[in-house]
Image (spheres, rainbow, N blue to C red):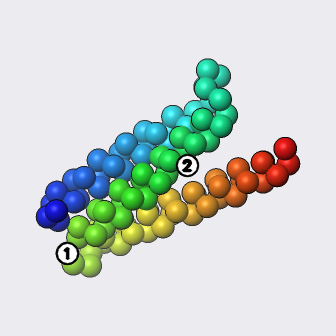
Amino acid sequence: MDNHTKDIFGSFIQAVGTIESAIGSTPIEALSKRLLNNLTVKGNVLQAVGCGLSADAQETISFEKIGDEVQSIGNVTVIIGLLLKLKNQQNKN
């Protein structure tokens, strides 16, 4: 896959993840809390992967590449926090 295609694909994956995470973060009574939590986690995973692909597509060090890398790390941090929260909730039940 050439770098231009990788960058576009990464941006698309990131956008899908943002939408999925936003749906998961919205309190919707028709959806179970478990489903909403799963959407939030999976959305953040897609965002992290998309940013990683976009960063990898950059051939030289630039602010864009660094920004994509930092954002990907931030999404991974959010994922860890969400998974720890879910684990603590399961241990209480």
- Give residue 45's position: percent from left, percent from top: 47, 54
Looking at the rendered image, the quarter that the C terminus falls into is top right
Depth check, mark 1 against mark 2: the one in front is 2
Q: Which mark is residue 76?
A: none
Q: Residues within 10 Å of mark 2 (few under 14, many from 20)?
A: many
> In the rendered view, would you say 33 is above or below 88?
above
- Give residue 57's position: percent from left, percent from top: 23, 67
- Give residue 27's position: percent from left, percent from top: 62, 30
For marks 1 and 2, the one nearer the N-term is 2
What residue is rendered at 61% in x and 61% in y? 80
- Give residue 36's position: percent from left, percent from top: 60, 36
Kindly identify which residue carries mark 2: 41
Front-most of residues 3 and 87: 87
Tell me the distance, in whole angstroms, between the alpha carbons under discs 1 and 2.
30 Å
Q: As drawn, which residue projects farthest toward the right? A: 92
- Residue 23 shown left or right of residue 60 in the figure: right
- Residue 50 shown left or right of residue 6 in the figure: right
Cβ atoms at labels 1 and 2 below 8 Å apart: no
- Could you say which quadrant of the image residue 88 lies in? bottom right
Q: Which mark is residue 59?
A: 1
Q: Amino acid at mark 1?
A: Glu
Give SS at disc 1.
loop
Q: Amino acid at mark 2?
A: Val
What residue is rendered at 25% in x and 52% in y? 9
